[in-house]
Image: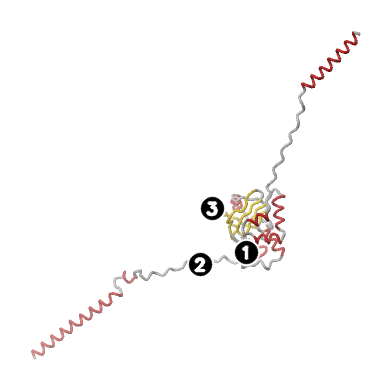
């Protein structure tokens, strides 16, 4: 009987200690899951170039050559981003020589790729680019597909050999897409050759004719055309005096004779 009581008391004490142990134990810590990195802003280049501009001519070339898909993939599927230089419609209208009408489809594609850099650049970044050499475009670097950049007091100039222009405005500049408007179509040497025509010299300033009321140099020298009548009248007066003297002398001689 005593053994049974001892067993029961021991059993109760065991359960009580187990329950207290479970209450005092702290719950296990759960590992924190890091928040996912925010996805870069998606920019629809077709919508952007349709609303801005007008860039309809350049957009038509991008779509006909499928380069718009290449640029879109570079913008949204890479960490580098993209910088695009977009000419306005007027730039294509003013392009007379050389013409784009004789280019093959592959050349048009390379021309479109030549208007982009495979990296996102802000306007401030171009100052560093201007201190280096030529920059490779999306069309490549070797073989005449590079651009030279210069920064003139914050104004970015581009030079392809055939084309010398500047960035006239920033259309869109948020990583990963930068779109900049340029004044001229960028023409690569790889397509149009290295026989680049010289830049025409600026027209001379027009010569302004002197006003009719302005004093002439002759008046500063002393005599003027208006003094001629005075000289003529002086000569007439002198001749009259001499004629009177001659008549007087001749009359005196007649009296003496």
Quadrant placement of the N terminus: top right
Of the residues under marks 3 and 1, which one precedes in the sequence?
1
Of the residues under marks 2 and 3, which one precedes in the sequence?
3
Where residue 157 sits in the image (x, y, percent)?
A: 58, 56
231 with respect to 105 (left or right): left
Marks 3 and 1, how far apart in space?
A: 28 Å
Residue 152 vertical position relative to residue 251 in the rendered view, above or below = above
Element carrying mark 1: helix
Residue drawn at 69 percent across, 51 percent down: 75
Other-residue count near label 1 (Cα within 10 Å), few / some / many at <14 / 14–19 / ≥20: some
Of the residues under marks 2 and 1, which one precedes in the sequence?
1
Q: Quadrant of residue 167?
A: bottom right
Residue drawn at 59 percent across, 49 percent down: 124
Q: Quadrant of residue 236?
A: bottom left
| Farthest residue, direction bottom | 257
Element carrying mark 3: loop
Q: Residue 92 — which label?
A: 1
Where residue 205 sits in the image (x, y, percent)?
A: 47, 66
| Farthest residue, direction left | 256
Residue labelled with disc 3? 153
Q: Are marks 2 and 3 in contact (CB under 8 Å)?
A: no
Other-residue count near label 3 (Cα within 10 Å), few / some / many at <14 / 14–19 / ≥20: few
Marks 2 and 1, how far apart in space?
A: 24 Å
Quadrant placement of the C terminus: bottom left
Element carrying mark 2: loop
Residue 30 vertical position relative to residue 138 in the rendered view, above or below = above
Residue labelled with disc 2? 203
Q: Nearer the viewer, mark 3 or mark 1?
A: 1
Q: Nearer the viewer, residue 80 or 24?
A: 24
């Amino acid at each position: 009987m005593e053994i049974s009581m001892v067993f029961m008391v021991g059993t109760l004490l065991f359960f009580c200690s187990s329950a207290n142990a479970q209450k005092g134990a702290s719950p296990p810590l759960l590992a924190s899951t890091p928040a996912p990195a925010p996805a870069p802003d998606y920019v629809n280049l077709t919508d952007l170039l349709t609303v801005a501009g007008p860039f309809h001519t350049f957009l038509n070339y991008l779509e006909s050559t499928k380069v718009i898909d290449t640029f879109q993939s570079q913008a949204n599927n890479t960490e580098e981003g993209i910088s695009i230089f977009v000419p306005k419609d007027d730039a294509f209208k003013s392009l007379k020589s050389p013409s784009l009408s004789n280019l093959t489809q592959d050349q048009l594609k390379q021309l479109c790729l030549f208007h982009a850099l495979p990296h996102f650049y802000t306007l401030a970044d171009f100052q560093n680019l201007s201190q280096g050499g030529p920059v490779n475009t999306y069309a490549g670097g070797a073989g005449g597909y590079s651009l030279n950049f210069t920064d003139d007091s914050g104004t970015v100039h581009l030079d392809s050999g055939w084309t010398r222009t500047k960035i006239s405005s920033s259309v869109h500049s948020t990583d990963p897409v930068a779109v900049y408007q340029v004044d001229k179509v960028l023409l690569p040497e790889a397509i149009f050759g290295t026989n680049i025509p010289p830049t025409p010299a600026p027209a001379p300033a027009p010569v302004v004719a002197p006003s009719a009321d302005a004093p002439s140099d002759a008046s500063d020298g002393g005599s003027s055309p208006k003094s001629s009548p005075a000289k003529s009248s002086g000569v007439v007066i002198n001749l009259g005096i001499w004629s009177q003297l001659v008549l007087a002398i001749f009359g005196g001689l007649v009296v003496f004779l």
